[in-house]
Image (tube, rainbow, N blue to C red):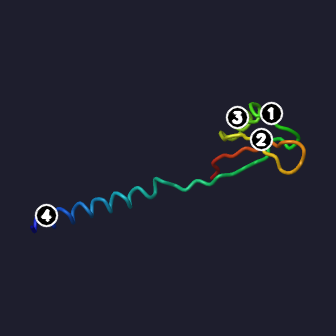
Amino acid sequence: MAKLITFSHFFLLFLLVSAVSMVPVAHARRLCTVELDPNGCILQACQWQCFQQHHGIGQCAHFGSQNYHCICVYFCL
């Protein structure tokens, strides 16, 4: 029984050390947005421009005006 408890404690300690050592690797990344074109949006052109400039995802968004805007969402530092 003592060996089982010792193994359990060792295994728990191993998991705890593993979890703590993984924390610096998993950096929190923020999402940023930028408006690439306020005058109109063609989805393929928006996606391409966003990827080229920021390695992000471009989407057409409508903000109450009559035309769509090209919005780029990307990971920033």
**Apparent side of residue 72 relative to residue 21 in the rendered image (left or right):** right
Residue 67: give its label.
none
Tell me the CA gap for discs 2 and 1: 7 Å
Q: Is residue 10 above or below residue 55?
A: below
Front one among 52 and 70: 70
Which residue is disc 2 drawn over?
60
Which residue is disc 3 drawn over?
52
Tell me the CA gap for discs 1 and 4: 64 Å
* SS class, disc 4: helix
Q: In the rendered structure, which disc, 1 or 3, sits on the residue that comes first in sequence?
A: 1
Mark 4–mark 2 CB contact (< 8 Å): no
Tell me the CA gap for discs 3 and 2: 16 Å
Q: In the rendered structure, which disc, 2 or 1, sits on the residue that comes first in sequence?
A: 1
Tell me the residue at 72%/32% (across/down). Answer: 48
Amino acid at the residue labelled 2:
Cys
Tell me the residue at 32%/62% (across/down). Answer: 16
Tell me the CA gap for discs 3 and 4: 57 Å
Q: In the rendered structure, which disc, 3 or 2, sits on the residue that comes first in sequence?
A: 3
Spot occupied by residue 59 in the image (x, y as percentages of width and height)? 73, 41
Quarter of the image where one finds residue 54: top right
Tell me the residue at 78%/45% (across/down). Answer: 61
Amino acid at the residue labelled 1:
Ile
* SS class, disc 1: loop
Tell me the CA gap for discs 1 and 3: 15 Å
Which residue is disc 1 drawn over?
42
